[in-house]
Image (cartoon, rainbow, N blue to C red):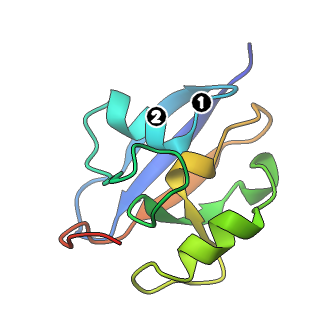
Amino acid sequence: MKIVNITFKFADGSPDQVLPAVEGESVLDVALNNDIKLQHNCGGVCGCSTCHVYVESGMDDLPEISDKEEDYIDRAVDPRINSRLGCQCVVQGNEDVVVTIPPQDFLGH
């Protein structure tokens, strides 16, 4: 299995965390397995926008965005061109990924 690093940056100013990710793991999985606060109201099944992240680099190592994911990103707080849902960012094991977690102090959508 291929292993890459995911660097988590935080909009709240917390220190960056660099964590290993195994091919097939999602950004949400890695965050939750390492006690990183990333909301996931739907349980990580692409049914809400609460695990919204900004992919700063490594987008080419993630699956293409689906229409369903794009619809939920449109509902996220402050969506940007590099917005993705953490549950849909499944590492393919070829390139390190850097994500920024926006503020998590909301009720969710």
Residue 26 rendering spot, x and y as whole percentages:
57, 38
Q: Where residue 9 is drawn, which disc sits there?
A: none
What kind of element bears circle 2?
A: helix
Farthest residue to the top: give it.
1
Q: Compared with residue 24, is residue 49 higher up or lower down, i.e. above or below? A: below
Q: Compared with residue 79, is residue 100 higher up or lower down, i.e. above or below? A: above
Q: Quadrant of residue 41?
A: bottom left
In the picture of the structure, the residue carrying the numbered disc 2 is 29
In the picture of the structure, the residue carrying the numbered disc 1 is 25
* Mark 2: amino acid: Asp
- Where the C terminus falls, by quadrant? bottom left
**2 and 1 marks in contact (CB < 8 Å):** yes
Q: Nearer the viewer, residue 36 or 95?
A: 36
- Give the class, few, some or many, for how many residues have Cα within 10 Å of label 2's Cα (few <14, many ≥20): some
Residue 32 rendering spot, x and y as whole percentages:
34, 36
Q: Is residue 45 left or right of residue 12?
A: right
- Give the class, few, some or many, for how many residues have Cα within 10 Å of label 1's Cα (few <14, many ≥20): some
* Mark 1: amino acid: Glu
Mark 2 and mark 1: span between their CA atoms? 6 Å
Residue 97 rendering spot, x and y as whole percentages:
63, 48
Image point 31% across, 71% down: which residue? Answer: 11
Image point 45% across, 63% down: which residue? Answer: 48
What kind of element bears circle 1?
A: loop
